[in-house]
Image (cartoon, helix red, strand yellow):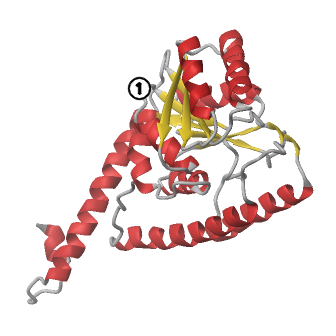
Amino acid sequence: MTATANSHSPGRAATGADTASLASRMSVRAEEEAMTEAQAHTERKLTNPLVEIVIPVYNEERALRPCIEKLRAYLTDTFPYPWQIRIADNASKDRTWEIAQELTREYPDVRAMHLDQKGRGRALRAAWLSSDADIVSYMDVDLSTGLNAFLPMIAAIAVGHSHLGTGSRLMHGAHITRQFKRELTSRVYNTLINLTFRNGFSDAQCGFKAMRRTLAVEMLPYVENQEWFFDSELLLLAEERNLRVVEIPVDWDEDLDSRVNIRKTATEDIQGLLRVRRQRKERRDGTYVVKTLS
């Protein structure tokens, strides 16, 4: 095999390290080919795609019912594609799961799943990978992001214009209301990402994203984070794979009852950025190994 001949110098027997390196490079090449096939599939127009909206929740007994009822009203009145809602409960300790079950009994287009471990990324991974929809998406339970941005994001994916869609609170045309501390933290973080990766997207953390399920199945094994860095890692992987990401400027009103711990999340984000940069180098070198997640 040509690849074997090129993996070591002439006249030297192949070592175990040579074989392992070759196997790693072949594995990465096979993964890239699978991703390319999935990417080509996403460029085909979907005529009437089923869209699933996942709402990840943790201890949201007060917000959950108003969120689902408002979201259902919007989808019923204005959304042209078939849709379903999935509530993904992240090990809530209050009545969130009980309310989620009530909603599934009341509305046939609402489903619910319960996870025994916390983590928004974990919830989204489980929901997207088990979905039967053509397009999977998610938004935060507080509905801080205006719903008027949802259809443009989904339409761009359905017609094959984009592989992945995300809301942006930082691009021209967005209208946001939030505290100075949160605004400053967001801008500093996104500047740090840009300086590190020269990425094309402006807002990594907006809780408002969508992609075709077939592509999610291919990409999610490479997204390791199970919590808040999940969004950033997903977008960075998409750009590394040269996928087209559409950003939609959003109207956004801060939820003052947010569960986000800014200090803990900032530490997690910085550690995540360093890991992603290291893993990009490993993929270039052919030494990257996919991590098994629980």
Q: Nearer the viewer, residue 123 or 26?
A: 123
Q: Nearer the viewer, residue 61 or 150?
A: 61
**175 sits to left or right of 218:** right
> Taking 23 as reference, is 67 above or below it?
above
Q: Quadrant of the C terminus?
A: bottom left
Q: Can residue 33 be seen here? A: yes
Could you say whether the residue bearing mark 1 is in a helix, strand or loop?
loop
Which residue is most to the top?
Answer: 77
Residue at 62 percent across and 54 percent down: it is 228
How far across and how far down the image is residue 118, in percent? 54, 50
How far across and how far down the image is residue 216, in percent? 45, 41
Residue at 43 percent across and 48 percent down: it is 219
> Taking 29 as reference, is 149 above or below it?
above
How far across and how far down the image is residue 235, in percent? 57, 52
**153 sits to left or right of 243:** right
Which residue is most to the bottom?
Answer: 11
Q: Amino acid at mark 1?
A: Asp
Q: Which residue is mark 1?
A: 132
> Taking 107 as reference, is 117 above or below it?
below
How far across and how far down the image is residue 169, in percent? 79, 45
Residue 7 falls in image quadrant: bottom left
Residue at 47 percent across and 68 percent down: it is 280
